[in-house]
Amino acid sequence: MPKASACRIDPVLSVIEDKWTLAIIHELSAGPRRTLEILGAFKGLSPRTLGTRLKKLTRSGILTRKSFPESPPRVEWSLTAKGREVVIVVSAIAEVAARWGVDTERSPATQCRVCNFKEQDEPRQRAKPGKLISEESTLIQPEQSSKPRKRTDVTLL
């Protein structure tokens, strides 16, 4: 029998406490991603662990899974409104890291493409403790390419 929660944050922590979970949410804050795109963003994350985390976040209402009726099948993962609320927590952690000087000596090979994308944008409204910022300011839209995406997984005969 599970023990009773002692604090209001316990149910939230039970969803985001697992290793890789906040990193996955951070990666998806830049927009929808396919499973292999998420997997390729992290060194050391196994496909099995990624699948487990994605399923748990979907059951918790943090992510949505969108399947496309194509051959080969395509699945995209994206944050829900509930998931975008967690991005505020991730942003606060990034601000603490910046104050600690964690990201001052990063090499180009190890830079986070999501953080770099956010830094290129004009300054955004910051969340103050106890205040929720508007939904559109927390959702980062990916850059749209003018040319269509080339499929590399299909061989034409």
Image (cartoon, helix red, strand yellow):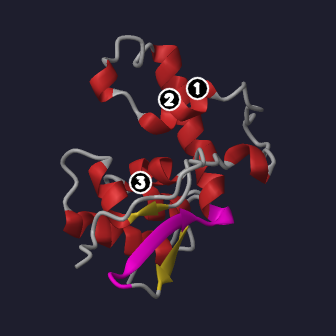
The residue beneath circle 3 is 24
Q: Mark 1 or mark 3, which has the lower sequence index?
A: 3
Image quarter of residue 103 = top left
- Count of picture labels: 3
Say the numbered circle drawn on residue 104.
none
Residue 68 position, x and y percent, is: 48, 82
Image height of 101 relative to 10, above or below: above
Which of the labelled discs sits on residue 116, or is there none? 2
33 on left or right of 127: left
The residue under label 1 is: 119
Could you tell me if residue 3 is visible in this image?
no
Viewer can see residue 112: yes
Q: Is residue 128 left or right of residue 72?
A: right
Q: Residue furthest bottom?
A: 69
Q: Which residues are magenta?
A: 71-82
In three-dimensional space, the C-alpha distance between marks 3 and 2, rounded to whole angstroms, equals: 16 Å
